[in-house]
Image (cartoon, helix red, strand yellow):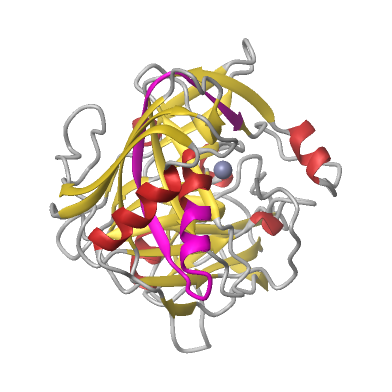
Amino acid sequence: MNIVGVRRRRSRSAWLPPIHLVLQPGCSLEKGGECSFYISSSLSVQWSQYRLESPYPPTQSQCTFRKQEMAAVTKTEKKKLHCPALEELCNVLESGLNKNFADVQVGVVDCPDLTKEPFQFPVKGLCGNPRITDVGGVPYLVPLVQRHKEYDMNTVSKEVELPGAFILGAAAAPSRVVGMNAEFMPLVKTETEGRPAVNGSYFSSINPADGKCLQEKYSDTFPGCQFGLMGNLYACEGKPGKVIEVRVKKRTGEDSLVTAMRKTLEAHYPDKNLALGGTFIIQKGKAKIHIMPREFSVCPLNTDDEVNNWLKHYEIDAPIICLSVFVSKDPGLDLRVEHTHCFSHHGEGGHYYIDTTPDTVEYMGYFLPAEYLYRIDRPQESHAIGRD
Ligand SMILES: [Zn+2]
């Protein structure tokens, strides 16, 4: 439900511009009822809890909301990352991946046109000022959810100093908008002046009818570019250009493709921080994924086992398109060092762990090293639970 054009009183004499309110599902809108809305500015994402002080329906002169609480948003931290030449990275990755896969080819290529099948992204390439951001975090999901933690891709693009950026990665769906909890696969060309955002994202939930995975295109049902709780995102200008191509077949080690790449970088550059973002396809085989339940846990989830028992796990079929962000090593910013979500064109997707068919699996991926890392709204109280 939308209330449009409600005015917010700043002082006795001054009025702020109209704001748009989207009420939380179930909000009764009675006098004294509470609702939440966000204010996004070029600098920060802010959520506030407001109380409706007069009856619904509102008029501009009658309806007032009293601010309950301003959710604290920590200041964004920025770090320059080590960003070696692509040829150097190819050599390092190829020798490392050989320890985990039987057949490995890594090279510098022109990024394939990502607007084409099977990707169908809203931009052509992964190039132009590559950077990553870790937004929010698992501590906003467990032990108990902090529902007010919601972010906007358009605001994130400004926070990472790249307005209009293309953003991909792994996040949680905006539960206030969607009306439930779900996995989110962000693929957003954010807005710039004169051009609206293009949201090619998917989200996956557990189908209450049969318990199976239900993947949907976000913009088929919902407007806007919000996401919830956490996001590990790669941002760039979406341009064509040179990228690292990774082709591997037959897994001989215990690590997933992402973990193998991350550990390779960590071992080769022990004193540096590198981050890669990009996309890869599981061309053959199956993969293990999870999807969060539609309802947040009402019992505190205090251990990895409790989180895993709450999550629902699936095995899904190739071809699967993955969106991945990983950091070789946390420079002390409470990062999730790797996070990959995936979607498919056959209705399955979610949070990727690893392939389950090592003998037959085939991967093909495109990556770029990020030049900067931005830590947005880092949780002030943190823990290491639920970061697999
Ligand atoms: Zn995830």
Q: Depth check: 232 or 284 in front? A: 284
Give the camera-side residue of 330 and 108: 108
Residue 208 appears in the picture as rendered = yes
User: In which quadrant of the rendered view does residue 161 lie?
Assistant: bottom left
Residue at 64% across, 64% down: 50
Left or right: 16, with 130 as reference point: right
Q: Relative to 341, say whether 29 is above or below.
A: below
In-image side of 227 versus 380 (left or right): left
286 inside magenta stretch: yes
In the picture, measured across the screen, residue 104 lies left or right of residue 237, that is right
Q: Does the segment drawn in magenta span residue 79?
A: no
Q: Is residue 241 left or right of residue 31?
A: left
Where ligand 1 lies, by quadrant? top right
**Figure label count:** 0
Identify whether 80 is placed above or below 158: below
Q: Residue furthest top?
A: 210
Snapshot quadrant of residue 333: bottom right
Q: Can you say which quadrant of the picture contains the C terminus?
A: top right
Residue at 54% over, 80% down? 75
Q: Nearer the viewer, residue 200 or 130?
A: 130
Is the residue 271 above or below the residue 383 in the image? below
Q: Tell me residue 327's x, y (percent).
A: 49, 61
Q: Is residue 224 visible?
A: no
The location of residue 171, given as percent across then percent down, is 51, 48
Occupied quadrant, residue 105? top left
Which residue is at 53% across, 52% downward? 338
Q: Which residues are the magenta region? A: 262-290
Residue 368 locus on image (x, y percent) = 30, 56
Q: Position of residue 296 (x, y in %)?
A: 72, 40
